[in-house]
Image (tube, rainbow, N blue to C red):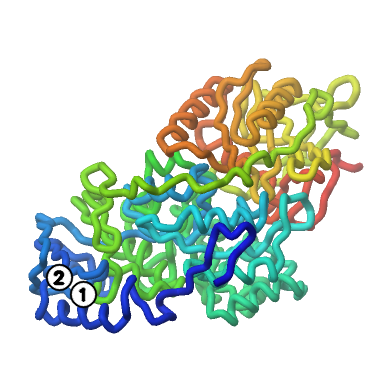
Amino acid sequence: MNQLLNGTIKFKKSKLNGNTFGGGPLMEKMKKRIEVASGKSPADLVIKNAQIVDVFSSEIISGDVAITDGFIVGIGDYKGLETVDAHNRFLAPSFIDGHVHIESSMVTPVEFSKILLQHGVTAVICDPHEIANVVGEKGIEFMLHASDDIPFDAYFMLPSCVPATPFENAGATLTANDLSPFYEYERVIGLAEVMNYPGVMKGDHDLLSKIHEAHERGKKVDGHAAGLKGKQLDVYMTAGIRTDHEATNAKEAKERLQKGMYVMIREGTAAKELCRILPIVNEKNARRFLFVTDDRHLDDIISEGSIDYMIRKAIKKGIDPITAIQMGSLNTAECFGLKDQGAIAPGYKADFVLLDDLEQIEIQSVYKNGQCVFSEGELTDFPKELEQKECSHLTNTVHLPVINEQSFHLDIVGEKAHIIEVIPNSIVTDHVIETVQKDERDRFIASIEKDHLKIAVMERHHHTGNIGLGVLKGLGLQSGAIATTVAHDSHNLILAGTTDKDMAVAANAIRDMQGGLVVVDKGKVLAQLNLPIAGLMSHEPYEKVNKRLVEINQALDKIGANHTFNPFLTLSFLALPVIPSLKLTDLGLFDVNTFSHISVSVEK
């Protein structure tokens, strides 16, 4: 039995490939279930008087749902040791998020699962590349270990691109050899979003080795085809990359569909493409679409929902309710080879929701493996013995000197500058050139009237002292500064502000609390959220973290932040140099279209 690093994880061989199933001998379990399915023995649990949502035939059917050993064994007329009357509610498969970074919720996997179960989500396909970019293999190990023994299925795709590009400094580098041992873990099902398209195109040996091993092991490979089209998508498909969550409009989604990809429709906190892509979804092609959240802040999940929110929104936009549920359950399961999940049918896991209203997706209760885990607004029987996993080796990751105002001086040659312009509710940016305001020393000065702010990315992993500086438009701050160590994907410190003084105060506050979010105005910290685990996650229960986020949002109101999008999550993507068009890394301003760093000043 293999061990990783300090041995806190012992790999579990897949039960489906061994001689056991569901915790006991395969033959014994199978015989028992067959007896129940045939009506010879009573089921453990029978759900009666439910309107069953059949995602295979797109119909509502009636019948008892018989459950034994956590699996559905029959639909028809059954007797059970326990009976639950659904009172004519709709019984639908529970929901599956096809691509999510748990770290973006800013809570640990246990706390994350508590929130999602309340929204009918019982499984996620997650990519731990956020924490991997900070602490490498130790981060993946922690996420796997921290998601063990939860009444919730956290499947993992291994981070394919750590770091994302060579144009920035991340905290770690993961090679094919580093990733290989993780495939022995039963919940690792593939290779996560391959965002290094140039590496695929040029045949980078290590990247192709990662893709090849995933295929050799019968695993899935996710794509990240931001801005790609035509032959570029052909290259992806030829490499065996079958999914993409970066389509930003119907045209891009249709081309991916025509190439044979599964199209992941994303509705996160920063990137919201659902309404742009839904117009091309119809009864002929709906089976090739699935829902993902990618990066969604905790407060949005609590207030709006997760995949349930996307299903609800799709129905309001005209998608048939059963089709919408299918897109949030069966389609995702089939895409990732989860052969016993995503439907209400014999031989499938008893993971389902009882709905008071099919179109509003009003969740009355949630079942995982045949056990009720949420009912009438409360979690039920969630294991209290689950402890916070040891993570002291993942703290103290913010390595910065004391910062002063001079750290943010930005010289501008000439009158105009290359500017990053925010596109609301998108992680794509515009590249604009505009005249900027300067002082007598030709240093950039923020302009509230022009909505020109200063933006900085500070390397925080290796004591390099690197600071990338630029000009930002569209964030809408009226005063003060904001800063965070949640900065995709290398998670250096990123901050934006109206004055160098407030930016320095924000940077020093982040250093002192070893990662998190902070809002500053007139030299004072208005609100902060400590994220000591790799600068990405909190130790605290989700309720406390959400309370801090409420305080953050109130502070954002005080400094006049834009209300049409989330300023922090928008800021966090401005350091990601694989998403068009203009971004900022610790090495400077980066033009994604040319894949090169450029000067902030416009050369004559």
Describe the element under mark 1 as helix, strand or loop: strand
Local crowd size for mark 1, using a 10 Å CA cut-off: few (<14), some (14–19), many (≥20): many
Whether residue 278 sits left or right of residue 506 in the image: it is: left
Q: Position of residue 434 (x, y in %)?
A: 77, 36
Local crowd size for mark 2, using a 10 Å CA cut-off: few (<14), some (14–19), many (≥20): many
- Looking at the figure, which quarter contains the C terminus? top right
Q: Position of residue 570 (x, y in %)?
A: 59, 41
- Separation of residues labelled 1 and 2 (CA atoms): 8 Å
Q: Residue at x 12, y 58 (%)?
A: 84
Describe the element under mark 2 as helix, strand or loop: strand
Type of the residue with mark 2:
Ala
Question: Which of the pair 572/127 is nearer the observer?
Answer: 127
Query: Can you identify the residue that label 1 sits on?
Result: 73
Type of the residue with mark 1:
Val
Q: Residue at x 65, y 78 (%)?
A: 212
Q: Residue at x 47, y 36 (%)?
A: 540
Q: Are marks 1 and 2 in contact (CB under 8 Å)?
A: yes
Q: In which image quadrant can residue 229 be found? A: bottom right
Query: Can you identify the residue that label 2 sits on?
Result: 43
Residue 393, disc: none
Q: Can see residue 230?
A: no
Question: Which of the pair 284/339 is nearer the observer?
Answer: 339
First in residue order: circle 1 vs circle 2: 2
Q: Position of residue 510 (x, y in %)?
A: 66, 31
Whether residue 156 sits left or right of residue 401 in the image: it is: left
